[in-house]
Amino acid sequence: MNARTGNIGVYFFERSRKGNLRRVLLIGLICAGLLLYVGGKVRIVGLGYQIQELERETRELERVNRSLRIEASSLSSPERIETIAGKRLGMVRPKKKNVVVVKRKK
């Protein structure tokens, strides 16, 4: 009777160990899958925030670029250059008899 009871206990214990190992592996796989899923979602949200920040920065740089182009065109206008040449540098327009027009050969 003792031998029989001992065998049943050993058999039950071995089967239980296999079942526990399978459960642990299954739970580990489920946890790993959930971690990968949640990690992917977190990464997607982070990239979304990064895209929004870069788009905002792009809009700001385009605005600065437009204002710099306007400023450059106003600074290089012929009227402004002529005014600076006359007032700051003391330059004057040449008389018409001193102007020589040179035509370029084609």
Image (cartoon, rainbow, N blue to C red):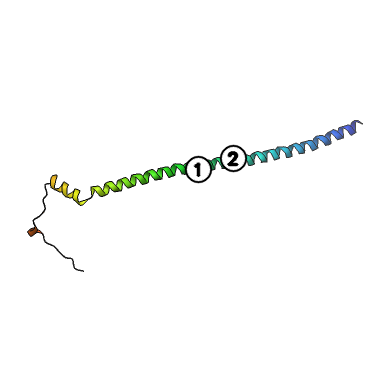
For label 2, the crowd category at 10 Å Cα-Cα, with few meaning under 14, some 14 to 19 and many 20 or more, is few
Q: Residue at x 55, y 40 (%)?
A: 42
Task: Return the residue found at the far top.
Answer: 2
Name the one closer to the observer, 37 or 5: 37
Disc 2 marks a residue whose amino acid type is: Val
For label 1, the crowd category at 10 Å Cα-Cα, with few meaning under 14, some 14 to 19 and many 20 or more, is few
In terms of image quadrants, where is residue 63? Answer: top left
Q: Residue at x 67, y 38 (%)?
A: 28
In terms of image quadrants, where is residue 25? Answer: top right
Q: Is residue 53 left or right of residue 44?
A: left
Q: Is residue 44 left or right of residue 34?
A: left
Q: Quadrant of the N terminus?
A: top right
Locate residue 18, reporting x and y percent.
Answer: 77, 39
Q: Is residue 64 left or right of residue 77?
A: right
Task: Write down the residue under mark 1.
Answer: 48
Which of disc 2 and disc 1 is earlier in sequence?
A: 2
Task: Write down the residue under mark 2.
Answer: 38
Q: Residue at x 65, y 38 (%)?
A: 31
Reply above or below: 3 against 48. above
